[in-house]
Structures are given as structure tokens and as C-alpha cells.
Amino acid sequence: MDIKTDQFQELSKKALTDGHLQQALQNLGAHIQAMRNSAFSLLDNPENLREQAHNIKRETLDRLDEYLEHLEKNVMRSGGQVHWARNASEARRLIETIALDKGVKTVVKGKSMVTEEIALNKGLIAHGIEVSETDLGEFIIQLAGEPPSHLIGPALHKTKEQIAELFSEKLGAKPMKDPQEMTTFARKALRQRFLEADMGITGVNFAVAETGSIVLFENEGNIRLSTTLPKIHVAVMGIEKVIPSLDNLDVFLKLLPRSATGQKLSSYISIITGPKRDGERDGAEEFHLVILDNGRSKILADEDLKETLCCIRCGACLDFCPVYLKIGGHSYGWVYSGPIGSILTPQLTNRKQAHQLPYASTLCGVCAEVCPVKINIPRILIALRQRYVEDSEWGKPNSVLEKGAVALYACTMRNRWLYEKVSRMARIVQIPFIKRGGLRNLPPPLNRWSRHHEVAPLEKTFRDQWRRFSKK
Amino acid sequence: MRITLFIPCLIDQFHPQVGKNVVHILKKVGVEVDFANEHTCCGQPFFNAGYWKKAIPLAKRTIKAFKSAHVVVAPSGSCVHMIRKHYLELFRDNPVWLDQAHELSEKTYEFSEFLIKVIQVDDLGASLKGKVTYHDSCQVLHGLGLSSEPRQLIRKVRNLEFVEMERPDLCCGFGGFFSFKFPHIAEAMVEEKVKNILASGAEAVVGCEISCLMNIGGYLKHRGIPVRALHLADLLACGI
């Protein structure tokens, strides 16, 4: 998809005036938070589990090269093929080549953020291949030609009325009102595509180095169909998706569904090890695993930012983020949104273009509190801001006005005498702005604040008063 | 017990009565209070916005200003969070300053934390007729892990009814630079906060962080809503 990260201001303003979206976000916040919290309350020691999950991810990242080689060896041993892609275009080319070599005409896809990241569909469609998203949410946004607005619920920005309209317009459905009726309609439309598809493409939730298996979590059964019905299965993963062994999966089985949808367990969990073997009835005949870097190794090399790669894409940070719940996913201008998008996108896409994203947070810290792998997102947001401000490799994109104001402010605060003088001066300068007991109609940029706030006038400072009352 | 007061710049400039009330309360419970005249800003706004090189000299100033203090008390959760957690980060490659940052970090307390955890006083004899609710500021709650301490203090105020609002932990949308960079989002956030405050029926919202209180209180005043935003120290000083 087109990267619109530089339009954060405009997109977020638009989102705030979109009534449907605001309703959808309000519903999301109210429901998913309660479900997540109640699912977590059933765990004996959720804090301990989160700590374990964090440690597994961190330790894997510390020896990522070894685990990836291990994974490759074991995938090949089980009859699968492994392809390494340095960037999005290499990954697209690899998958297109597999498809074209095998004469693939139709593809069914399971929901996968990484294939959104590399804009895979566009490439395949350009080669005349028909690509069908089969996750209900993805199916809807594919029809609408829109990007996902949430990691887990890609179509949550759409109301059921809008979806019914879309089904009528694009698929000739009769007018429908009942969500169940609409789901049945989509299921029927998809069933034929599953049966006809030459290739199934999915993402990967976890790749197990020890066994060469990939693990997929889902609720609709569409991933199971996509990985077993077509002759060829291509799974795409970022390098950070590997875990050392099946034993490690236990922790994530408890944490991922709870964090993503508030379920104790997803409806379907598939562990796939290579293609189907002789005598087996189900499974693809060919299994390809595409392992993608696309900027991740650069993140890995940076101690302060590395933790970004612990993310298991559950979406909990979005569900709890007070900023995301106001502006929705599309405001962030690329496939990843919310707090994780604010740290991931600037590291995976054009830095300068995405520079507003790390600032699109109040640093309230709720994301870190709910993250199942304990990523300290506020800490990474601050580290990214620091890069933007102080590291010329990050383009120093902040405005001259901001830099000037910050320099003046800092200079004043460094000198007590000056701080006191400036404060006394400000108490005089403010006089014309005091109306009905408050500061009003302040000049820019202060009007960004005074537009929505009555500001109390500056008073005789505490320190000035202290001098007096401490002498008593 | 003798403490040194840390007065955040926003309190110093806009709400000096908070500082005065802190002094009044502490003296009442027998704590002697000093003021370190040399401190200005802890550097938090600069650190949070990425201007670390600007934050470092301010952090050094603050460390020096409180060098001889035994205990530092600040009526501001975010400044304490800055000193306690972020100073260690700022000086992580500077062992000399890191030691001193550790020292300050360990002796600095947020106001309600100091009352409950250090001197273990929860009843200050305050009295106020009315109904209040409490806003969990993000740096107080998520940063310092303080949630029961301020509530315990509020509940001891005589004649006062305490009610919880819906989602007291929901961010009010201030976020320092955030509300200047994205005022439209900040407004939507404070609007939701205020909606929850009003639904609780409280006549005042109490907090331990002046920036949130200025955000919520300023918005309430702008909208002409007769609900006050009170610093915990302002509440605890009522009637004493």
C-alpha cells in the first residue's frame, strides 16, 4: 500500500470527524478491554507469564542467526523449501516466481500483516493471478480496496450497514441486515475459491526452529483451508517470528489469544511441519517458507530499539491506547497502527516521512502494561524521538520553530537568575491577555492550548513567596 | 524528619498555592521543610521530546541542587518519575553522574507516596464538604505504581464523599509536547475524561500531577463547567 505516514495530521483530523469510525472505536474499546482483562484474570500468574514470554523473545533475538539457520535446516529436512528475502520487492519476486513457475492462477490468503507490509497482492494481481483474502475482515477490506485498520480486526472501521452495501455492490448480494446472514454469504462466496485455488498464502505466528514447524492461530478455519486445500502453501514470516522449541509455545498459547481477542484459546491452532508426506491425506504438496528481513536486521543491531522485534502482533496495545481509540488505524498511514505502529513504522519505512508517529503518543504507558511480551513501548518512543532530534541519520525533521522554542526554554531553565527574570517579565507581558480571570486569545503557538483551555494567569512564583514566608 | 521540597516549574509559575499547601501540611505533621532555591526544571519535557542533550544539563543542575538533601518530596508524579527512572537512562554512559543520579533517585518521593509510605500518615485532619473523584495520572499510576496511596488520603478527609469515575486510569490527553503537536487529538481525549468526571457526579476531580490538572481544569473552565480540578495537596489542606 501507499505509505501516507507524512499525512498523520490530516488523516487523524479526518478520523475524528468520522462518526462511523468513532462509534466503531468506542465499541472496540469497551468490549475488547473487558474481554482481555477477564481472560487474563483466569491465569494463575499473568505477570510471570509475560516475563517468560519477554525472556524467550529477547533471548531468541540475541541468537537470532543461529535459530534461523536451525529453522531453515529443519524446514528443509521435513521436505519444505526456504527462501530468504532481503526486502519487500525480493519477497514479492520470490513468491511471484513460485506462482508463475507452477502455473498458479488463483490464490487464497490467510490474514497476514507481513504480506500487507510487502504489498504482495498487488504484485500477484499484476501478473494476472486472482488473489482472494479469506479472513472475513480482510475479505471485506479487499472488496473495499482499503488497508487494514487494526492488526487483528482489519475491517473494524466498517459498520455492518457499510459491509452489507459493499456485498451488494461488489458481489451482487441482496440487501442484508443480520451479521450472521452476511457471514454465511461471505462463507459461500469463499468456499468455491478455496476449492479452486492453486496456492495458499499465509503468514506465520511462530516458527519453531527445533522442528521446522510453523504455528498459525485463527478463529475462522480459513487458514486451515488455505494451508490444506491448495497444492502449494507459501508461508511468509519476518525474521523475528522464530522461537527455539515447541516447549516455548506453551506460554504464547496462553498469552496470544487472550491479548488478541480476549479468548482463552483461538478456535483453530495449526502446527504445520513441511508438506504432506506419502500416505497422508491432507496438506499441501509443496511447502515454501519465505523469511523476510525488510529492515528488521537494522532494528536488531540497535540495542535501544531491538525490543521492537519481540512483538507478536496481538493488537492489545491498540485496543488500550487512548490515542488509537480516538483516531483509528488509518491515521497512522501504513499497515501497522497504534503504539506498535508508532515504533515499527518509522523503523521499517522512510524515517523522515514517518517522523510524526513516535510523537503521536502521550507516553501514558498503558501499552507497556498490557503488552503480552512486555515491550517497553514508551521507552522506545522516547528513544526514537531522541534519534529524530539528535541523530543526523534520522534527518532532523522537527520544525525550526520547535527547535528554537526548545532552545530558548532550555536556556532559560539552565540559569536560575534568568528563569526568575523571565518569569517576572512574563507576568507583565500576560496582562493584556487576562480576561475574566483567565488567559485568553494567546498568540500562536500558545493558541493551540488556549483554544480548548482557559489558562490560569502566572502568579507570583512559589520561590518568590518562599523567600518571604520562610523568613517568618 | 527534614525534607527538601522540589517544586515543579508549572506549580511554581501557575499554581504556587499547591507548594504552599504542601509546606503547610508537612509542617503540620512535624516535618521540617527546606527549599532548594537552585532547582528550576527537572528536564522532563526535553527528555520526553527527544532533546536529551538539553535535558542533561538540567538533570545535572537538579542533582546538584539536592545534593545535600536527605529526602526530596515533589508534589508531581511526572517529575519524580523523571528523576527516579529517566535520570538513570540519561547518565547510563556516565558512571560519575550515574552514581549521583542513583542517589537522588532513591531519596526522591512523590507527595502522597511520602505521606503514606515514608512517614505513614493518612489522616491529616482535613475537612471538606462535597463529593470528589480521583484521576490516576499516567506517570503516577504506570510510572510510579501509586494508586491506593492518594485514595487512602482522600478517604480520610472529613465530610467528603469519594466516588470512582469510569476508567480513572484513562489518560487525560496532555502528554506534554503531544497536546501542542496534536491539539485535536488531545481535545478529544480530555473531552472523554471530562465526560467520565461529570458522569461520576463529583464536584471536583483530585490528582497528583499538575499538568493533568491544568489540562482537565483548563478544559472544564473553558467549557464553563463548574467542576474544579484540585491538587491532592489543595484538598488535604482544606480546613487545617
Image (cartoon, rainbow, N blue to C red):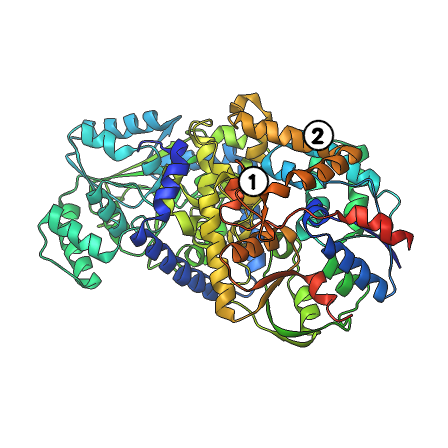
Classify mark 2: helix, strand or loop.
Answer: helix
Mark 2: which amino acid?
Answer: Cys
The residue lying toward the viewer, choosing from A261 and A159, is A159
Which chain's residue wears label 2? A
Mark 1 nearby-residue class (10 Å; few <14, some 14–19, many ≥20):
some
The relative height of residue B231 versus residue B86 in the rendered view (above or below) is below
Where is residue A400? Give x, y as percent.
Answer: 54, 25
Where is residue A413? Give x, y as percent.
Answer: 72, 35
The residue lying toward the viewer, choosing from A152 and B140, is B140
Residue that badge 1 annotates: B177
The relative height of residue B67 versus residue A38 in the rendered view (above or below) is above
Residue that badge 2 annotates: A411
Disc 2 + disc 1, Cβ < 8 Å: no
Q: Is residue B205 left or right of residue A461?
A: left
Q: Is residue B191 left or right of residue A219?
A: right
Q: Which quarter of the rendered picture does the N terminus of chain A lie within? A: top left
